[in-house]
Image (spheres, rainbow, N blue to C red):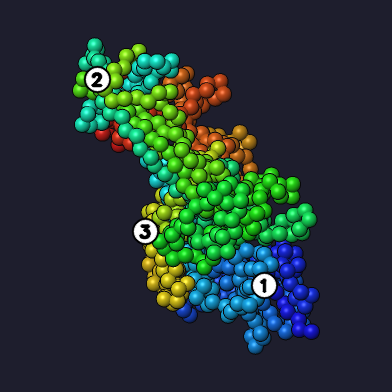
């Protein structure tokens, strides 16, 4: 009897796939990559057309030895690694490491680990796609060159083991730029004006907001403007000038891609991107379901596509018709793709492998997090095949002299896909205005005004979801790279995650500033996006992969040489402070550590004394008059606090000024070339004098 060997990446897949194949199939796992570039050196022969030097990954020798034994017994070998560039590269590396030349070797791939999909892949076995392999090689070599050529320079400048990366450095810059926007943001004052109206026959008042005039919307910028409008409204008659009713519909959402799954899991479940990918991998590879054995619950989790197979589409529509009624079955959607760029893969959106396997039916077999993520994927997929939701919208304008107030509301006429799924950040629909229908020309009695002062808010700090969305929109990296990129900049303490928000740390600022100064193209958003486009062209066979490296390398090398020369001319000395080491009497010096600056004794290693470095901000504490110092949160985010903490609880995210607000007496904070009152209720702003700015 013929003997066939199937090589997969993960041991979990071995169990899932074994039960689909006959006894003459042996299934083994490579446990991911088996070869890579060496860690101890660049591993790329720059002099000989950038040829990579691959070695067996430490610990993989025994795995390869066991697979070789099975190779000798096999008549045919099927490489069943993941269906993307990375998986294609792993298959190619296996052929090299196992010396499979001359043997009957076939590449198979499946988008879901189900019996039908696995059997179909065996019938459609093919050769390894070297274009996909080369695209992955190009990415790996580019990342290695950037990391290994730039990191030593950062290390030399900051005197510690920092590192740079082609995608991570751009992600860091995006976060840093947002931080700069927030820090330089000047809030602007505005006022809201609401009016409550009594409507004949109704107990509940009708509340409408000031809009402006019939011709234009007016923003009320100050209390004086508000007072003028209120004076002009005095004694006015209030009449309904316009009532508009309309219907609108909201289309069903598209099924998940890797990016949209990461975003929605972050917003709805508060999952970090790395956690989302880890749990999705478990659902894809297979879960032991009571009564069914190990089952792959979802399709492949790394995809840019929103395409759904005809078979899965038909199954979903059949399920919806049975479970919810035929009126909930959506019309066939046009073939669209979530991204105009080249698709990373030829497979589908992320969906359940079997739509009839409802979350409730398998809840007992899943962990809490597995259940929540599977439920999110299942609901989104089912909703994507459902009818649009339909709403009736009512808009009312109320006239008072030349001014207008406006109010609108909508009610659901047919819930459609919302029967199953609503997005985490979807705005709730307002209900009906009041019980009865309002009529144009109807007089209303004004009961009261309600006005409030507001200030415009700065852009929000990035969350993981927002950063993923931005990276995707800018064409930086690939969905599979987002989670490791974000994990890297957090683990290296360039970025701190507090709650859901990402904040740049002092260390992150240092690295970002040096990258912008010495390697501007590496952290340039457009350059990085263009590089992704070139990698796509390699995958399509339109560009030779080594030519991409050859065009990139000279400019990088020139920047590295220039940065190294600058380093030679600037000797970096430790900053000596007036703080005396209590153990040996030397003046302590400023050093960089994993959390930023700290004080260390220059007598190291004889004296190992260290202590926190509290850099003085050069202003007095507004609460107690002692010195304000720069402190950090536990995760590395910088703030300004009193040296007398914890006795004095003063803190500010912006640098305080010695100047007091002339309007309310609160302390002022520095924002670029302006001073802004720290009180949110005040909003006073003034320009800083030239000499004040130059002194800083």
Residue 639, horizontal then vertical, whole percent: 48, 33
| Residue under the image location 71 percent in, 59 percent down | 295
Q: The residue tagged with tag 1: helix, strand or loop?
A: helix
Residue 38, horizontal then vertical, whole percent: 60, 69
Q: Nearer the viewer, residue 633 or 90?
A: 90
Q: Nearer the viewer, residue 423 or 406?
A: 406
Labels 2 and 3: the sequence-earlier one: 2
Is residue 233 among what the camera can see?
yes
| Residue under the image location 53 percent in, 73 percent down | 133
Residue 76, horizontal then vertical, whole percent: 70, 82
Identify the residue position indicated by label 2 in the image.
Answer: 400
Q: Nearer the viewer, mark 2 or mark 3?
A: 2
Q: Nearer the viewer, residue 429 or 168?
A: 429
Whether residue 288 sits left or right of residue 609 in the image: it is right
User: What's the distance in space between the residues labelled 2 and 3, CA to CA?
Assistant: 52 Å
Q: Where's the N terminus, which quadrant?
A: bottom right
Q: Is residue 552 above or below residue 369?
A: below
Whether residue 145 sits left or right of residue 17 in the image: it is left
Whether residue 395 sits left or right of residue 269 in the image: it is left
User: What's the distance in space between the residues labelled 3 and 1, CA to CA?
Assistant: 43 Å
Labels 2 and 1: the sequence-earlier one: 1
Q: The residue tagged with tag 3: helix, strand or loop?
A: helix
Question: Quadrant of residue 75 in the image?
Answer: bottom right
User: What's the distance in space between the residues labelled 2 and 1, CA to CA?
Assistant: 73 Å
Identify the residue position indicated by label 3 in the image.
Answer: 526
Question: Quadrant of residue 547 in the image?
Answer: bottom left
Identify the residue position indicated by label 1 in the image.
Answer: 119
């Amino acid at each position: 009897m013929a003997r066939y060997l199937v090589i997969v990446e993960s041991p979990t897949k071995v169990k899932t796939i074994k039960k689909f194949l006959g006894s003459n199939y042996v299934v083994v796992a490579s446990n991911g990559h088996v070869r890579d570039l060496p860690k101890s050196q660049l591993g790329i022969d720059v002099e000989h057309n950038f040829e990579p030097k691959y070695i067996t990954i430490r610990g993989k020798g025994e795995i390869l030895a066991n697979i070789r034994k099975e190779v000798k017994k096999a008549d045919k070998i099927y490489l069943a690694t993941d269906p993307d560039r990375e998986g294609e590269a792993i298959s190619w590396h296996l052929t090299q490491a196992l010396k499979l030349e001359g043997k009957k070797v076939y590449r198979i791939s499946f988008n879901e680990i189900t019996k039908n999909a696995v059997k179909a892949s065996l019938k459609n076995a093919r050769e390894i796609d070297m274009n996909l392999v080369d695209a992955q090689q190009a990415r790996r070599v580019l990342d290695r060159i950037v990391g290994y050529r730039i990191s030593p320079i950062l290390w030399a400048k900051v005197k510690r083991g920092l590192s740079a990366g082609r995608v991570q450095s751009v992600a860091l810059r995006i976060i840093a730029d947002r931080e700069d926007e927030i820090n330089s943001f000047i809030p602007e004052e505005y006022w809201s004006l609401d009016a409550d109206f009594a409507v004949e026959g109704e107990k509940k008042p009708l509340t409408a907001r000031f809009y402006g005039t019939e011709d234009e919307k007016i923003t009320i910028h100050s209390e004086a403007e508000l007072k003028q409008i209120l004076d002009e409204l005095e004694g006015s008659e209030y009449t309904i000038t316009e009532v508009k009713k309309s219907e609108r519909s909201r289309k069903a959402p598209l099924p998940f891609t890797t990016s949209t799954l990461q975003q929605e899991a972050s917003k709805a479940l508060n999952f970090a991107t790395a956690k989302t990918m880890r749990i999705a991998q478990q659902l894809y590879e297979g879960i032991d379901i009571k009564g069914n054995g190990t089952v792959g619950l979802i399709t492949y989790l790394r995809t840019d596509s929103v395409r759904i197979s005809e078979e899965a589409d038909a199954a979903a529509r059949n399920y919806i018709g049975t479970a919810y009624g035929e009126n909930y079955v959506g019309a066939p959607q046009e073939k669209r793709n979530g991204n105009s760029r080249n698709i990373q893969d030829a497979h589908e959106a992320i969906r359940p492998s079997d739509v009839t396997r409802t979350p409730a039916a398998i809840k007992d077999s899943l962990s809490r997090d597995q259940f929540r993520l599977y439920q999110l994927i299942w609901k989104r997929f089912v909703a994507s095949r459902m009818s649009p939701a339909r709403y009736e919208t009512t808009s009312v304008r109320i006239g008072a002299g030349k001014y207008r107030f406006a109010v609108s509301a909508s009610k659901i006429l047919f819930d459609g896909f919302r029967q199953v799924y609503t997005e985490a950040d979807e705005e709730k629909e307002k209900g009906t205005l009041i019980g009865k229908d309002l009529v144009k020309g109807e007089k209303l009695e004004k009961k009261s005004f309600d006005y409030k002062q507001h200030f415009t808010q700065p852009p929000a700090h990035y969350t993981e979801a927002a950063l993923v969305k931005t990276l995707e929109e800018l064409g930086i990296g690939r969905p599979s790279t987002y989670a490791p990129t974000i994990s890297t900049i957090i683990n290296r303490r360039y970025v701190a995650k507090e709650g859901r928000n990402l904040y740049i740390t002092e260390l992150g600022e240092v690295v970002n500033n040096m990258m912008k100064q010495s390697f501007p193209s590496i952290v340039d958003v457009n350059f990085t996006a263009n590089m992704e486009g070139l990698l796509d062209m390699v995958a399509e066979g339109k560009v030779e992969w080594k030519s991409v490296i050859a065009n990139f390398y000279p400019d990088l090398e020139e920047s590295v040489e220039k940065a190294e020369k600058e380093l030679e001319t600037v000797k970096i000395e430790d900053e000596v402070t007036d703080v005396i080491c209590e153990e040996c009497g030397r003046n302590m010096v400023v050093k960089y550590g994993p959390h930023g600056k700290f004080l260390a004794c220059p007598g190291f290693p004889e004296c190992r004394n260290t202590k926190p470095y509290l850099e003085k901000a050069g202003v007095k504490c507004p609460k107690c008059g002692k010195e304000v110092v720069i402190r950090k949160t536990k995760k590395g985010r910088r703030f300004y606090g009193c040296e007398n903490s914890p006795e004095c609880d003063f803190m500010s995210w912006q640098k305080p000024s010695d100047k007091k607000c002339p309007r309310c007496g609160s302390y002022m904070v520095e924002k670029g070339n302006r001073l802004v009152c720290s009180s949110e209720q005040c909003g006073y702003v003034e320009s800083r004098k030239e000499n004040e700015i130059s002194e800083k």
